[in-house]
Amino acid sequence: MIGRLNHVAIAVRDLAKASQVYRETLGAQVSETVQQHEHGVTTVFVTLPNTKIELLEPLGADSPIAKFLERNPDGGVHHICYEVEDIIAARDVLKAKGARVLGDGNPKIGAHGKPVLFLHPKDFFGTLVEIEQV
Ligand code: CO
């Protein structure tokens, strides 16, 4: 069911510093900063030849990644995103197979303007999984 790896997301404390490291140390192509108020994050995307890296910094007091950074003060891999063709069909198959879908179970519009859902990390070996319809 899942297709390509769309991105790997890394939570960081200092997005400007992380952007600089990816741009200058790693020599990667780094996007402009985008504030996503409905997701509680500020993001940049690093474009690689075969996938993307999403750098996430907390935005606002209720940011879902604030707690993650409390547990991981140096930052760390926060989630991975797989592409699916039909997010509603994928959700229904996953639920039928016992996977827990986070939130109210309805897709939200993600960072690329496409519908996304998140799956419970305990069902996927400790990794928060995002699925995105492409
Ligand atoms: Co993501």
Image (spheres, rainbow, N blue to C red):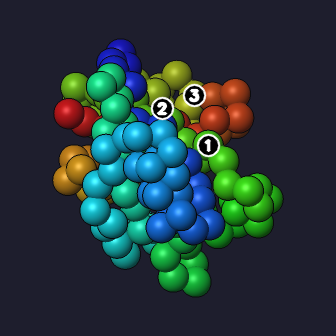
Q: Which residue is mark 2?
A: 95
Expressed as whole percent of the image width and height from the top left, the position of residue 133 reads 25, 36
Q: Is residue 115 above or below residue 125?
A: below
Query: Can residue 64 be seen from the camera position used here?
Result: no
Tell me the quadrant of the picture where the C terminus can be found. top left
Badge 3: residue crowd in 10 Å (few <14, some 14–19, many ≥20): few
Q: Nearer the viewer, residue 38 or 4?
A: 4
Image: 109 above or below 90: below
| Label of residue 98 in the image | 3
Whether residue 128 is visible, yes or no, is yes
Q: Are marks 2 and 3 in contact (CB under 8 Å)?
A: yes
Residue at 73 percent across and 56 percent down: it is 74
Looking at the rendered structure, the secondary structure element under dot 1 is strand
Residue at 41 percent across and 49 percent down: it is 23
Give the quadrant of residue 100. top right
Bin the neighbour count of mark 1 within 10 Å (Cα to Cα): few under 14, some 14-19, many 20 and up: some
Q: Which residue is mark 1?
A: 77
Q: Amino acid at mark 1?
A: Val
- Please, what secondary structure does the residue beneath circle 2 have? helix
Q: Which badge, 1 or 2, is on the more N-terminal residue? A: 1
Depth order, front residue of 6/122: 6
Q: Amino acid at mark 3?
A: Gly
First in sequence: mark 3 vs mark 1: 1
Q: Which of the pair 9/131 is nearer the observer?
A: 9
Rounded to the nearest whole Å, what is the CA distance between mark 2 and mark 3?
5 Å
Q: CA distance from mark 3 to mark 1?
A: 25 Å
Is the residue marked 3 within 8 Å of ligand 1, measured from its CB? no
Q: Position of residue 17 (x, y in %)?
A: 53, 64
Residue visible at 52% across and 52% down in the picture: 21
Amino acid type indicated by mark 2: Lys
Which residue of the protein is positioned furthest toward the bottom in this rendering? 61
Local packing at callout 2 (Cα closer than 10 Å; few below 14, some 14-19, many 20+) is few
